[in-house]
Image (cartoon, rainbow, N blue to C red):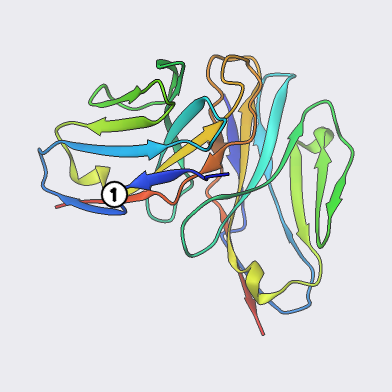
């Protein structure tokens, strides 16, 4: 069973640029969630995708957008990067996304984004 | 509104000591789920346990045990006979079962340091 993978591991971008982060879900999982974890803080929910549709969104501006593909992998796109976007971005996959029952979410190792 | 509070920022213990990590949650829903995750220095969140609001039985898994008390809105985690490998940041999280999307709301985490 393959776990959740994310790429790249680390990324350095300049303020105002755009970035795309990628996530492959665990085998058998149809739901992908993205979280932002600032240094010393708990992860904050960005959004969730199920069957290629956004299925819930946290308190993040529209410049944070995502995609889910037919194979359940996902991308997180951030436009007009700001210094405060520097964080660890975590992807989590789970099953049963069509139900309002939160199954266990399994996390990837994250992408460390630094905005200068 | 949902909220998770982990009042202990850092805890230091010596190997073989027992340690309890506190978690207090707030929610207006009667159906909700509580989680604990471990984040070792590598950064990847590791799932430990999920409990639903209708099951108040305490749970034990090896050296780990969880005490769920709805009367005090707490879901505390105890490690018995701690080991150096238990050193990590531990997060408590909450998810409500009746909303679109199954976002996890995390506390700020408790950093546990176990010395030999």
Circle 1 chain: A
Say if B32 sits above or below A20 in the image.
Answer: above
Say if A54 sits above or below B85 in the image.
Answer: above
Q: Secondary structure at mark 1?
A: loop
Name the one closer to the observer, A92 or B36: A92
Name the one closer to the observer, A28 or B45: A28
Q: Residue B56: which quarter of the image?
A: top right
- Which residue is farthest bottom? B116
Is B43 placed left or right of B105 in the picture?
Answer: left
| Identity of the residue drawn at 46% across and 31% down | A33
Q: Quadrant of the C terminus of chain B?
A: bottom right
Q: Residue A19: which quarter of the image?
A: top left
Q: Residue B115 placed where, x, y %?
A: 64, 81
| Identity of the residue drawn at 65% across and 67% down | B86
Q: Residue A12 placed where, x, y %?
A: 18, 53
Is B41 placed left or right of A95 in the picture?
Answer: left
Q: Residue A3 placed where, x, y %?
A: 52, 45
Q: Residue A107 placed where, x, y %?
A: 51, 44
User: Callout 1 environment at 10 Å: few (<14), some (14 to 19), or many (20+)?
Assistant: some
Say if B85 sits above or below A40 in the image.
Answer: below
| Identity of the residue drawn at 71% across and 74% down | B83
Name the one closer to the observer, B62 or B65: B62
Residue with the mark numbered 1: A8
Is A27 placed left or right of A63 in the picture?
Answer: right
Q: Quadrant of the N terminus of chain B?
A: top right
Is A111 placed left or right of B78 in the picture?
Answer: left
Say if B89 sits above or below B94 in the image.
Answer: below
């Amino acid at each position: 069973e393959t776990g959740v993978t994310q790429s790249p591991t680390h990324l350095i971008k300049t303020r105002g640029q755009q970035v795309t982060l990628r996530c492959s879900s665990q085998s058998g999982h149809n739901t992908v969630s993205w979280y932002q974890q600032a240094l010393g803080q708990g992860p904050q929910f960005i959004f969730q995708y199920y069957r290629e549709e956004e299925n819930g969104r946290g308190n993040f501006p529209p410049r944070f957008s995502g995609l889910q593909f037919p194979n359940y992998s996902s991308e997180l796109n951030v436009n007009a990067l700001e210094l405060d976007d520097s964080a660890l971005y975590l992807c989590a996959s789970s099953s049963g996304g069509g139900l309002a029952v939160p199954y266990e979410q399994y996390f990837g190792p994250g992408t460390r984004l630094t905005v200068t | 509104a949902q909220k998770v509070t982990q009042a202990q920022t850092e805890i230091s213990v010596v190997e073989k000591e027992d340690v309890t990590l506190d978690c207090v949650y707030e929610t207006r829903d009667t159906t909700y789920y509580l989680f604990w995750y471990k984040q070792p220095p590598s950064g990847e969140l590791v799932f430990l346990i999920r409990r639903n609001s209708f099951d108040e039985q305490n749970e034990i898994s090896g050296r780990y045990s969880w005490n769920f008390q709805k009367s005090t809105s707490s879901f505390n985690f105890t490690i018995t006979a701690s080991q150096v490998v238990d050193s990590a940041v531990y997060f408590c999280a909450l998810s409500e079962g009746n909303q679109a999307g199954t976002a996890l709301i995390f506390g700020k985490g408790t950093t546990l340091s176990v010395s030999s």
